[in-house]
Image (cartoon, rainbow, N blue to C red):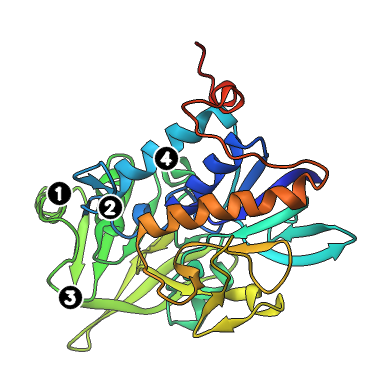
């Protein structure tokens, strides 16, 4: 059982900054996210896209913003639980017992939902036969690329993830890249690199093809792909990777007794607490009159939610507001020595 003051659900910018605000007021926290890395939408959907509305930062990418926020919370040694989703939530006296999809349990005083507009889950193949190979020889993300060494991999998709992994894995594996169109949505440099590798025989590119079926017993042995004009080819494959983007789902949060309006959670604007005491919601997932879905708004919400958590984590103490420029306690927590 992991015991901490606050559990943050969601490792996007809003959740990361909330963790910082918890740290400077002396509260501990851990973070759970359904994705395999921190950064939320910023890192998964537009890591290279410029962002222009972060105060005092004229321009940065989603990846740069994420890296800066991770650097900012480094003094607090926050533990991340990635590739996990909160599945169970129970109140035990004045504390919450939480269990994730990986079976990890938490004992916390408060919960902050910072999950964007829900948990990100990958778009999957529509071919039913794919289901039995998921997590075995068919994947929608890569955690350990070493398993693909000297194997034959069929990658489906036309975005940055599909292109980048096709290029990367072609160094030590035989790669087939299959896309349903001639055009790609990834960056042009990667598109040209893939075409160059195809011409050199270092990967096989199939356009205007889609998955028809996947064959094998306990593991994948081959895939059949179908051309727009009806032609079917069978390709030997040890592994299949699908990169079709992400969809967002509220998931188990629907069963937590929260006031949900149009797939968002209603909160107050004093501390962004929900109708359930001890559960807060910040970022795109929360709603209130005048809500702006901006990262800077999420930072404000996270700062106030952190202070709202204090009364649950330390009910016998009074929180005194201090600026970090003058608070010796906050400076010590940040590792600043004067």
- The answer to the question of whether label 2 and label 1 lie on touching residues, with beta carbons closer than 8 A, is yes
Mark 1 or mark 3, which is nearer to you? 3
Q: Earlier in the sequence, mark 2 or mark 3?
A: 2
Residue 222 in percent (x, y) is at: 41, 67
The quadrant where residue 95 appears: bottom right
The crowding category of the residue bearing disc 1, from other C-alpha atoms within 10 Å (few below 14, some 14 to 19, many at least 20), is some
Report helix, strand or loop for mark 1. helix
Q: Which residue is mark 3?
A: 181
Give the SS element for disc 2: helix
Q: Label 1: which residue?
A: 197
- Alpha-carbon span between mark 1 and mark 3: 18 Å
Answer with mark 4 or mark 2, whichever residue precedes in sequence: 4
Which disc number belongs to residue 166?
A: 2
Instruction: Judge depth for marks 4 and 3 and give the one in front.
Output: 4
Secondary structure state at the residue bearing disc 3: loop
- In the picture shown, does residue 159 fall above or below 151? below
- Determine the residue positioned at 36% across, 67% down: 245
- Residue on which the image places disc 4: 69
Is residue 178 depicted above or below 316 in this figure? below
State the separation of the CA atoms marked 4 and 2: 30 Å
Query: Which label sits in the foreground, 4 or 2?
Result: 4
> At x 78% / y 41%, what residue is drawn?
317
For the residues marked 2 and 3, what is the alpha-carbon distance in whole angstroms? 16 Å
Q: Nearer the viewer, residue 102 or 262?
A: 262
Identified at 24% across, 55% down, the residue is 163
| In front: label 1 or label 4 | 4
Q: Residue at x 21, y 52 (%)?
A: 52
Q: Earlier in the sequence, mark 2 or mark 1?
A: 2
């Amino acid at each position: 059982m992991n015991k901490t003051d606050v559990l943050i659900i969601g490792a996007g910018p809003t959740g990361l900054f909330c963790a910082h605000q918890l740290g400077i007021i002396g509260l501990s926290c851990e973070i759970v996210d359904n994705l395999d890395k921190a950064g939320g939408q910023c890192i998964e959907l537009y890591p290279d896209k410029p962002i222009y509305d972060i105060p005092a930062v004229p321009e940065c990418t989603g990846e740069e913003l994420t890296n800066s926020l991770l650097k900012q919370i480094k003094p607090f040694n926050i533990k991340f639980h990635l590739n996990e989703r909160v599945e169970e939530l129970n109140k035990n006296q004045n504390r919450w017992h939480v269990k994730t999809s990986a079976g990890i349990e938490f004992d916390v005083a408060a919960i902050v939902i910072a999950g964007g507009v829900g948990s990100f889950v990958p778009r999957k193949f529509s071919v039913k036969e794919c289901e039995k190979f998921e997590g075995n020889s068919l994947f929608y993300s890569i955690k350990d690329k070493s398993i693909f060494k000297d194997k034959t991999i069929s990658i489906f998709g036309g975005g940055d993830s599909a292109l980048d992994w096709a290029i990367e894995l072609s160094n030590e594996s035989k790669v087939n890249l299959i896309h349903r169109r001639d055009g790609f949505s990834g960056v042009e440099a990667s598109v040209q690199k893939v075409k160059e590798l195809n011409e050199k025989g270092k990967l096989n590119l199939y356009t205007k093809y889609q998955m028809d079926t996947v064959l094998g017993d306990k593991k994948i042995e081959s895939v059949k792909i179908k051309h727009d004009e009806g032609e079917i080819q069978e390709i030997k494959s040890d592994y299949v990777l699908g990169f079709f983007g992400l969809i967002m789902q509220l998931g188990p949060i629907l069963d937590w007794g929260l006031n949900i309006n149009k797939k968002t959670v209603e909160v107050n604007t004093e501390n962004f607490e929900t109708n359930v005491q001890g559960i807060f919601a910040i970022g795109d997932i929360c709603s209130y009159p005048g809500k702006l879905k901006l990262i800077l708004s999420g930072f404000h919400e996270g700062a106030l939610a952190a202070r709202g958590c204090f009364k649950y984590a330390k009910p016998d103490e009074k929180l005194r507001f201090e600026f970090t420029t003058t608070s010796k306690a906050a400076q010590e927590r940040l590792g600043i020595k004067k």
